[in-house]
Amino acid sequence: MNTTESPAGLEPASTAGLASHGVPSGENDGDLDPFSNPYILIEAESSRVRFDLRQLWVYRELLYFLIWRDIKIRYKQTLLGAGWAIIQPLFAMLLFTLFFGRLARIPSDGVPYPLFAYAGLLPWTFFANALTNSGNSLVGSSSLITKVYFPRVIIPGAAVFAGLLDFGIAFLLLIPMLIYYRIAVTWNLLLLPVFICLVTLLALGVGMWLSALNVKYRDIRYALPFLIQLWLFASPVIYPVSIMPERWRWVLALNPMTGIIEGFRDSLFGGKLDVLTTLTSAAMTIAILIISFFAFQRVEDSFADVV
Amino acid sequence: MSKPIIKVEGLSKRYRIGALGHTSLRDAIAGAVRFPLRSLSRENASAENTIWALKNVSFEVEPGEVVGIIGRNGAGKSTLLKILSRITKPTEGRVALNGRVGSLLEVGTGFHSELTGRENIFLNGAVLGMTRREIEDKFDEIVAFAETKQFLDTPVKHYSSGMTVRLAFAVAAHLEPEILIIDEVLAVGDIAFQKKCLGKMNEVARDGRTVLFVSHDISAVNALCKRAILLHEGSLILNGPTREVSAYYLDTANKLYSPITWVDFKQGKCDEIELLTAGIQQSGLNTTAVDCRAPFSLTFEYETRKALPNSRFFILVRNAKGEVVFGTSDYDLPSEETTHRRTGKFVSEVNVPEGLLKAGSYYGTIGADIKNERIIFAENDIFQFEVFESGDDTLAERHKRVGLIAPLLRWQTSEAASKPQD
């Protein structure tokens, strides 16, 4: 957004009184030029992109209210409300345990398979829901976009952050499971917030990009479920990375969800963290986030005309 | 004088017709295959499929001014507001805004029907740019203004539409930016509430805040703004005192808008009666701006393909609020033609006397029915016209009275014959 807000722009001109009453003030009159340091400057569309984080800060409360709205509405409209947050990963875990753990006997790095699957499903479910919700968020907010100004990133952003509550609720189920399977937590647990952070940033990056694409190409809505399904099988949710031959693991690591899910499990079960995979995933996440933020800024001016 | 709070310089906005709205990925891929050298995002727009919604518009607004922006639909008013509200970017030109901007392009943006009144106040306030502190501070005032205290914790979906509008306007009315941009939001709600809103807007203006008010309701602009800007087909035509600008607007309406005064209809909507054209005449001219001090007529041409005995044509005229001002039918005073209703082409002219309607916008519906049986056809809002007062202030006074019409009636008053006294 090449719109700037400067707090100093509000100062009344010190030369008041010089211009006669009723006559518009001189346009090139130094202090009287409204374009010298204006509070808000609106300029023609350009491909110039400014990394304007201050705008985001100004509108932080709107972000908060939109997250709050998303959560409120979902819990008001659904019968089971918060229950869905647990049902989704829980049933996926039961199915995976039956088919992949029992029947296909996929190894699980020494952790009981249900726990292994659930610990992978937690970040995965959050990620998949965040992509779905944020991918469709801009199109679903067309009434807001065409009527009010705010940094548009807030919309897919709110959709991602609102999912963190569900994640938190689903996480609670992990505690009795850890106790039941007698898994002792280690100091690795302190690393968990890092991976939660990473998965949120990744969801933000991919979701932002998908939401912008969806405004222009409505095919995204239909491609999304398919994309998410493919991504699930490309990520170590059902299987551990260790079933891949060592020399091919770097390919898996290019998928940032690999490092995140593996790191998630290692933090919970005290496994040895694969530093290289983690760093690759973190780097990929940051790269995706930055690229998609710039791509988003480039097209966000046109949303109101297109949506 | 201080520096202008709003300065608009050479503002233009181009829209690409056809490219408006979303494309499908398939088209984009097909396009990339056919024109591999052209970038997907910046296609060269050829002149024939673009329209300039705004062309080189420049003006200034001083702090504390209340400026009206008038013009027909499609004149570029909404585009100008959207640019000033930063919803869309101009194609050319620039704008300096020296203050916090609050814009109200719609009542109740962001309202969600599942949320309660209380929750919507906070959400809508945040959407309009208020901070949580501001909303909390003004909460009681907002609720009092909206008169919906007892329903505060009821989801808005159970509200009547009037209540929703009142609540939404109440939030908006408590915005306190230095520059307030308003788009015809007053055209909603009941009359008492509209008055309250107008009062609130006047208060806002008196507080020294700058207001840009867009409307095609000339009387509202006259009531609120000292200065007005007239837009026509994207260009700024006139910028000056409201009275002059609105007089010019109404005066030139014939010249500027003559092509659209006669409506041409698509064929074959109804196989019994087909409306051919419709228009309004005053003093022998086609017009959409009617001087209330002279009679005018609503005229339409139609073809009946079937003899329809006992059918009757009617016209319903509604005001800008959607209230029916009057209904009239050719059955009221039947003539030879209307009783037989033969097949053929006919022209009907309905004469409306002078000094009857209030100043404002009107919409006329034409229809035909067979009494107590069925409606043959009805075309909504065929006639769209603006009634204005050309007389002096004393005569203009009656347009502000209560009542749907403001007839100029003759009063005959003479001294009562007094009893002879001794």
Image: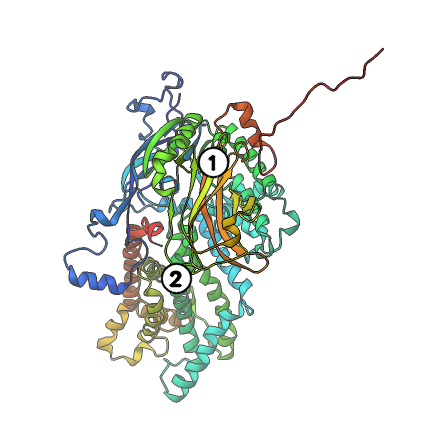
Amino acid carrying label 2: it is Asn
From the top left corner, tell me how far across and down residue A69 is, in percent.
Answer: 50, 56
Q: Nearer the viewer, mark 2 or mark 1?
A: 1
In which image quadrant can residue B141 be found? top right
- Residue furthest to the front: B336
Is residue B61 visible in the rendered image? The answer is yes
Tag 2 secondary structure: loop
Residue count near mark 1 (Cα–Cα under 10 Å), binned few <14, some 14–19, many ≥20? many
Which residue in the protein does label 1 denote? B296
From the top left corner, tell me how far across and down residue B389 is, in percent.
Answer: 49, 29
In which image quadrant can residue B279 be found? top left
Give the vertical position of B188 relative to B289 (above or below). Answer: below
Q: Chain of mark 1?
A: B
Q: Are marks 2 and 1 on the same chain?
A: no
Q: For the point 61% across and 39% down, which residue is it?
A: B192
Give the vertical position of B37 relative to A27 (above or below). Answer: below
From the top left corner, tell me how far across and down residue B115 is, in percent.
Answer: 55, 56
Amino acid carrying label 1: it is Phe
Q: Nearer the viewer, residue B289 or B361?
A: B289
- Residue furthest to the right: B422
Which residue in the protein does label 2 denote? A136
